[in-house]
Amino acid sequence: MTRIDFYVLQESTTDGRLNFVCRLVEKAIGQGNKVMIATEHAAQSQEIDERLWNFKPESFIPHQQIGGLAAATPVTISHRGDDPQHHDVLVNLRATVPPEFSRFQRLVEIVVQDSAILESTRKNFAFYKARGYQLNTHKL
């Protein structure tokens, strides 16, 4: 069964949320995981793409937006579809639950103190809980 983790940040901006995604992804691939980042729209996919390129000058996070050579990189970014090559970690930045979430070993939801994000992640929390998933909350 998919492990589901909610990281609750005290940040109130999406900027803080996206910075946390970069740190989380760096740690996940450092542990040998493949990661798919499910984004809300093309602009968010592009923003994550750029942040991963510039995250740390001394490190490189190999990534690709879906439609490219996704199978060859440990990180895939997608606002449209799924990458069947990735099964380890799904980072959900969408307002809704991605339909493919249950095939991943781990799902991560990142919560910031923004009313729209709080509302959508609460709905997602209720969705997972109603289906019997064990939910882990990490307050940072």
Image (cartoon, grey):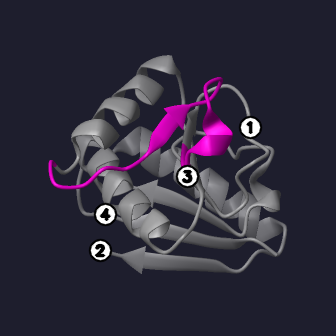
- What's under tag 3, amino acid-wise? Pro
Camera sees residue 112: no
What is the crowding at mark 1: few (fewer than 14 residues within 10 Å), some, or many (at least 20)? some
Of the 4 image quadrants, the one containing the N terminus is bottom right
- What's under tag 2, amino acid-wise? Leu
Q: In whole angstroms, how far apart are the C-alphas of marks 3 and 2?
A: 26 Å
Q: Is residue 133 left or right of residue 19?
A: right
Q: Which residue is drawn at 44% across and 57% down?
A: 110
Q: Which residue is drawn at 51% across and 43% down?
A: 93
* Magenta highlight range: 57-75
Q: Which residue is drawn at 67% across and 42% down?
A: 71
Circle 1 or circle 4, nearest the eye: 1
Residue to which mark 2 is pinned: 140
Q: In whole angstroms, how far apart are the C-alphas of marks 1 and 4?
A: 27 Å
Q: Foreground: 122 or 74?
A: 74
Residue to which mark 3 is pinned: 74
- What's under tag 4, amino acid-wise? Leu
Asked if residue 125 is among those painted magenta in the image, a careful observer would answer: no
Q: Which residue is drawn at 24% across and 41% down?
A: 15
Camera sees residue 18: yes
